Image (cartoon, helix red, strand yellow):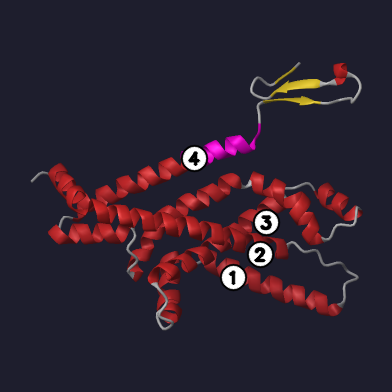
Amino acid sequence: MSFFDWILKLVSEYWLQFLSGTKNTLIMALTGTIAGFIIGLLIAVVRTIPVSDNANKFKKISMKCVNFILSAYVEIIRGTPMLVQALIIHYSLFVPMKMPSMLSAIIIISFNTGAYMAEIVRGGIMSIDKGQFEGAQSVGMSHWQTMYHVILPQAIKNIMPSIGNEFVVNIKDSSVLSVIAITELMFISKQAGGAYAKFVPAYVICAVIYFILTFTVTRILRYLEKKLQGSDSYTVCGSQSDPNAEIHVNKEAKRYD
């Protein structure tokens, strides 16, 4: 049989397994990205809490300890491969707890993504003009109120491409979790290839499915980003009483009427 004949044979015999593996890959990547974003968001907000010189000693020491722990988490996770993290966490914690492998995989992806999301969100927060922080504080808003009502809506919009990129990365990086016997796409490909000792055709099928997933997700995310940017044409109201003071802007044509 030719190379392409083997591909067709493996697809015809294992298409249900490939479909199930693709579903598990998407579930892990999507759930892990959402949970990781929440973890990163909380870490970024906590790490940006200002500590004034007038604060009491206990608060200063507490914030230093919290920041040290969160910084250590971010640096350790970002400085080690997810494959190593998966092996250590799964076999030292989750196997003794008899936790289901799928739940274990989602937790591992979530904690790994959370470290990267923490820096992404923190960068988005730092990109907002300091005058907006000062303006919110001048009207009596606390740090959490400032973040919720003023800063985060703008920061999240700015970092949407990076969040989408993390989702795409998680789709691909979930392949390493086949080492803990998760029936995701890579695990199924190994099984299909091992049945006939034809690993290359099985991995080609796997690569094509990964490409279709990432290409589709990327296009959907670009569409959502464009929607978040708003209309290309809008009106700046210069006066409530004088229609002539209005400015019509066309962003696409970069023209002011």
Q: Earlier in the sequence, mark 1 or mark 3?
A: 1
Residue wearing tag 3 = 122
Foreground: disc 1 or disc 2:
2
Q: Are marks 3 and 4 in contact (CB under 8 Å)?
A: no
For the residues bearing labels 1 and 2, Cβ distance under 8 angstroms: yes
The amino acid marked with disc number 1 is Tyr
Q: CA distance from mark 1 to mark 3?
A: 15 Å
Would you name the residue on which mark 2 appears? Answer: 43
Q: Amino acid at mark 3?
A: Arg
Q: Position of residue 206 (x, y in %)?
A: 29, 51
Farthest residue to the bottom: give it. 96
The residue lying at 64 percent from left, 35 percent from top is 229
Of discs 2 and 3, which sits in the foreground? Answer: 2
* Extent of the magenta region: 219-230
2 or 3: tag closer to the N-terminus: 2
Amino acid type, label 4: Ile
Of marks 1 and 2, which one's residue comes earlier in the chain? 2
As measured in the structure, the alpha-carbon distance from the residue carrying label 2 to the one carrying label 3 is: 8 Å
Q: SS at mark 4?
A: helix
Query: Mark 1 highlights which residue?
Result: 73
Q: Quadrant of residue 227?
A: top right
Seen in the image, is 3 located left or right of residue 102? left
Q: Is residue 255 left or right of residue 97?
A: right
Give the residue displayed 86% in from the left and 25% down from the top: 238
Q: Could you classify mark 2 by the number of other residues whose Cα lies within 10 Å: few (under 14), some (14-19), or many (20 or more)?
A: many
Which of marks 2 and 4 precedes in the sequence? 2
Q: Is residue 9 magenta?
A: no
